[in-house]
Image (cartoon, rainbow, N blue to C red):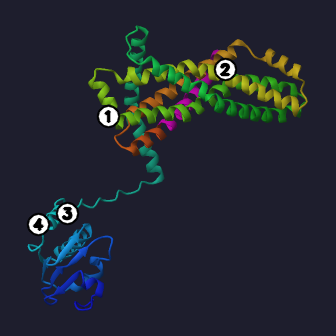
Amino acid sequence: MALDSLPSEWRALLAVDGGPDAPRVNLTGDWDLRGTVPRYAQVASCFATAGRVTVTAAGLGAWDSSAVTFLAALKKDCEGRQVTVDDSALPEGLRRLLALAFAVPPPPPRESEPTPSFIGAIGLRWIKMWRDLPAMVTFAGEIMLSLARFVRGRARYRKRDFFWLVEEVGPRALPIVSLISFLVGTIVAYMGAVQLALFGASIYIADLVGIGVVREVAALMTGIILAGRTGAAYAAQIGTMQVNEEIDALRTLGLSPIDYLVLPRMLALLLMVPLLTLYAGIVGILAGMLIGVTVFDVGVYEYIHETIEALELKHFAVGLVKGTVYGALVAFAGCLRGMQCGRSAQAVGESTTSAVVLGILLITIAASILTVLFQKLGI
């Protein structure tokens, strides 16, 4: 664009004279974002061959950030081509804003890290888990010390918070536990009944559903539900406190964050998960009975009698023990990731996701170990 070919609406705001080697830029009129102001990229060709640029503001009226943006782009372009820009004739306020715009240098370009391969990503994940193991052991030890203080009556936490957590973990979780337990009981009944019906042994649906749900399925599904519902909530709550520096404030006041935040959540799950497990087992049995009676022509009395004959006290004990262990692991994973949360909103989301993944992983490992252990013990 030639110096004398600027649009008329721009020439009312921007006068360029002095020749292409040493152009003189004069800002006039009102440089207001509400009006039409030129952008530097649209007139940059006027300064392509300049060796020195002089900027003045004779006749400049009201101005805002549009003028600062234009002059900053001009100055940056000229400095990149080692062209001198004389802005001494500008108003003091405008010069100070320009100086402020160039006070902080731009950050150096970040070198892009190479994307690891699939095998490399798996290796990095395992290395991270291995390095995280000491922190998990330390956190478990702190929880044990806190439980010891609780037994001695020396743990400091708010009773009101504890009862609120009990309500949140127990009664408010009943709808989702009921739905999932009913559906899983239905699935177990169908899976077994189709095969048992081939041998004319449909009555043994009661044995399959009763023992399977009470011993394994109820505790496992309750633990997984709580990992996604309660474990994530614990991580988000404590992580948000970490971001807001509330945990630092507790330490400053001489209060243990483990006693004040982690202990009530652990106790709430230890108290309510066995009850939820027992409830889930009953719902699963009722779902199996519904399928057996309505689909496979098993009598109600026969189904109930066969269930009572099949179930023993040890089956309920195994299910309650597993449910208690799963609840403790959910509380451990959620509180651990919450305490390890960073100081940003993104870190809260990452800790929440990690809490769910870790909780389900620990539940799966514990389920495998406990199942083999109880089978070896003959329980």
Residue sitting at x 90%, y 24%: 299
Q: Residue at x 24, y 74 (%)?
A: 30
Q: Label 2, on which residue?
A: 278
Q: In the rendered view of the protein, which quadrant contains the C terminus?
A: top right
Label 3: which residue?
101
Highlighted range, magenta: 355-379
Dot 4 surroundings within 10 Å: few (below 14), some, or many (20 or more)?
few
Residue 81: give x, y in percent of width and height: 17, 77
Q: Which three-letter amino acid code belongs to the residue tagged 1?
A: Glu
Q: Nearer the viewer, residue 142 or 315?
A: 142
Q: Which residue bears the numbered disc 1?
A: 245
Specify the amino acid type for callout 3: Ala
| Residue 318 rendering spot, x and y as whole percentages | 64, 18
Horizontal placement of 5 versus 49: left or right? right
Badge 4 or badge 1: first in the primary sequence: 4
Marks 2/3 in contact by CB < 8 Å: the verdict is: no
Q: CA distance from mark 2 to mark 1?
A: 39 Å
| CB atoms of marks 1 and 3 within 8 Å | no
